[in-house]
């Protein structure tokens, strides 16, 4: 399921622009929510019983946690030729396993791996996008010759 737009999220917010969430407006809150910088619980008004319906709709739209934490990596398997450029170019993979630095397949858990001729996720929890503070690394996407990877 693709990520909802900030406007789709905004449509279900109370639209009081109270600032209690730390954002200047409800639209700014929707944008921060989409980027994973805040959670639904940060909006006091949304947590009130009066807004239960909207809160449930947003949880369905964003996922049960109400906060988008995924790296948002989309793999287009039909485009992937299994070349492994994404695997050996990933700075995390190189630092985790010296085999990757030498252009060989990883022996330890890394972010991405080629299995059965296609790239797949192995352990995205070590991806730079999960670090605190987040780093919006795109190295794997930029090095894919077939544009089989995309962050959405």
Image (spheres, rainbow, N blue to C red):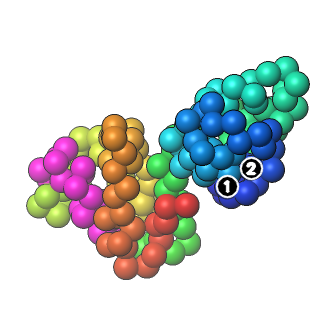
- Which stretch did the figure color magenta? 83-99
132 sits left or right of 58 in the view:
left
Q: Quadrant of residue 4?
A: bottom right
State which quarter of the image contains the C terminus: bottom right
Vertical placement of 150 versus 69: above or below?
A: below
Q: Position of residue 143 (x, y in %)?
A: 32, 72
88 falls in the magenta region: yes
Residue at 83% over, 36% down: 54
What crowding class fits label 2: few (fewer than 14 Cα within 10 Å), some (14-19), or many (20 or more)? some
Residue at x 55% of width, y 36% of height: 22
Q: Is residue 12 left or right of residue 98?
A: right
What secondary structure is the stretch in magenta mostly built from? helix
Observer able to see residue 127: no
Q: In this rendering, does residue 27 appear at all?
A: yes
Seen from the viewer's position, the closer of residues 49 and 143 is 49
Q: Is residue 37 magenta?
A: no
Position in image of residue 46 (x %, y %): 76, 30
Q: Secondary structure at mark 1?
A: helix
24 sits to left or right of 134? right
Between 76 and 44, the one nearer to me in the picture: 44
Judged from this view, the residue extending furthest toward the top is 49
- Dots 2 and 1: beta carbons under 8 Å? yes
Residue linked to disc 1: 6
Residue 64 percent location from the top left of the image: 68, 32
How dense is the environment of label 1, judged by Cα within 10 Å: few (below 14), some, or many (20 and up)?
some
Residue 10, numbered circle:
2
Q: Is residue 3 left or right of residue 117?
A: right
Q: Residue at x 80, y 50 (%)?
A: 11
3D distance between C-alphas at marks 2 and 1 = 6 Å
* Residue 33 location (% of width, % of height): 60, 44
Closest to the observer, 142 or 102: 142
The residue at the far bottom in this view is 145
């Amino acid at each position: 399921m693709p990520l909802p737009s900030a406007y789709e999220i905004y449509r279900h917010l109370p639209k009081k622009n109270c600032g209690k969430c730390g954002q200047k407006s409800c639209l700014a809150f929707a944008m921060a929510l989409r980027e994973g910088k805040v959670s639904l619980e940060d909006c006091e008004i949304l947590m009130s019983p009066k807004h239960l319906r909207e809160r449930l709709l947003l949880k369905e739209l964003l996922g049960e946690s109400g906060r988008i934490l995924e790296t948002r990596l989309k793999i287009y398997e039909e485009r992937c030729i299994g070349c492994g450029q994404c695997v050996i170019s990933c700075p995390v993979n190189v630092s985790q396993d010296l085999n990757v630095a030498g252009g060989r397949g990883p022996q330890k858990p890394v972010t991405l791996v080629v299995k059965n001729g296609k790239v797949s996720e192995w352990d995205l929890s070590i991806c730079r996008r999960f670090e605190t503070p987040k780093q919006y690394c795109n190295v794997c996407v930029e090095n894919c010759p077939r544009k089989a990877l995309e962050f959405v």
